[in-house]
Structures are given as C-alpha cells and as structure tokens.
Image: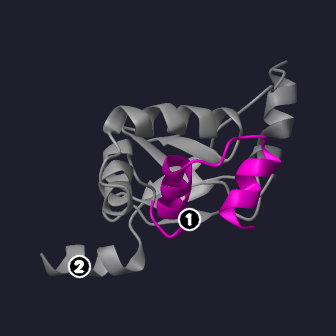
Amino acid sequence: MELEKLLKKKQLKVTPQRKAILDVLYNSDCVLNAKQIYERASETIPQVNLSTIYRNLDVLLERDIICRLISSDGKVFFKIRSGDNHHHHIICKNCGLSVTLKFCPINFLDEELKINGFTHIEHRFEVYGYCDKCKENLKKM
C-alpha cells in the first residue's frame, strides 16, 4: 500500500516527517532504532530533529502502522507492520534482519494455559539469533 494512503487510512495527516519515517522503515529489511531512523530520514529532510522522530514514532505506534520490538537487552527497535494482522518476528542480533513469521506460536501453549487456569489476553514473541550471512561471518572471526 502506498505510504500516503496508509496514513490517510489511519486518519493521520500526511507530513514530510511521517512520510520519511515510513519510507525509511518500508525500505529496510532490518529493525531500526529511533536514532537510525533519524539518521536515514535526515538524508531526505535535513532539518528534521530527533524529538520529531520520537513524537511521530509514538503516533505511528498508536495507529498500528509500525510495531515496537524490545530486545532481551532492552534496546527498542521499530518495523513497519506487514499487514493488519497480529504477527511475530525472527531477528538477527548482528545485522538486525527481521523476518515476519507466518504463524502465531501461542496456539501451542493453549493446553498449558488451560491446565494452569491462565487466561491469555496478549503476548509478544520474537526470536533472536543470527542469520546465515552473519553466522558465516562470525565463524570467520
């Protein structure tokens, strides 16, 4: 979907900053942190500042246009949503490559949740590891 149409569909004003942020995320195979988004967006809009990036990331998160991923060491990354559906990722800890899983693993836990009398209301699932390219490069070191 064209990025401007996506913003309009979510009832957001189309601004150069939002377009730049979405363009950066759309054209990246990797998850990016706010500073990386800022650096790439400032190539298109030199006058943009980091606080504007953070404000717009919050708005885009609220409207489910992007998703936030928090690594095991607490670092925060962003990725454009790959559709309106709930989804999960596998992420390379070295290069940040992010691949969307085609299924939700929570279904495998349904029985265990039931046995323990636990009602599931939400979840997050990300797997961190190394992609083939990084795995090969790490072996060479």
The secondary structure type at the circle numbered 1 is helix
Asked if residue 125 is positioned above or below residue 28 in the image, the reply reads above
| Residue that badge 2 annotates | 137
84 to the left or right of 68: right
60 to the left or right of 96: right
Q: Which residues are magenta?
A: 1-30
Q: Amino acid at mark 2?
A: Asn
Cα separation between marks 2 and 1:
26 Å
Residue at image position (81%, 29%) is 113
**Where is residue 133, by image quadrant?**
bottom left
Asked if residue 73 can be seen in this view, the reply is no
Dots 2, 1 in contact, CB < 8 A = no
7 to the left or right of 19: right
Q: Which x, y percent locates residue 136?
A: 28, 81
| Residue that badge 1 annotates | 26
**Where is residue 120, by image quadrant?**
top right
Residue at image position (31%, 47%) is 47
**Number of other residues with Cα within 10 Å of mark 2, as a class: few under 14, some 14 to 19, many 20 or more:** few
Asked if residue 108 can be seen in this view, the reply is yes
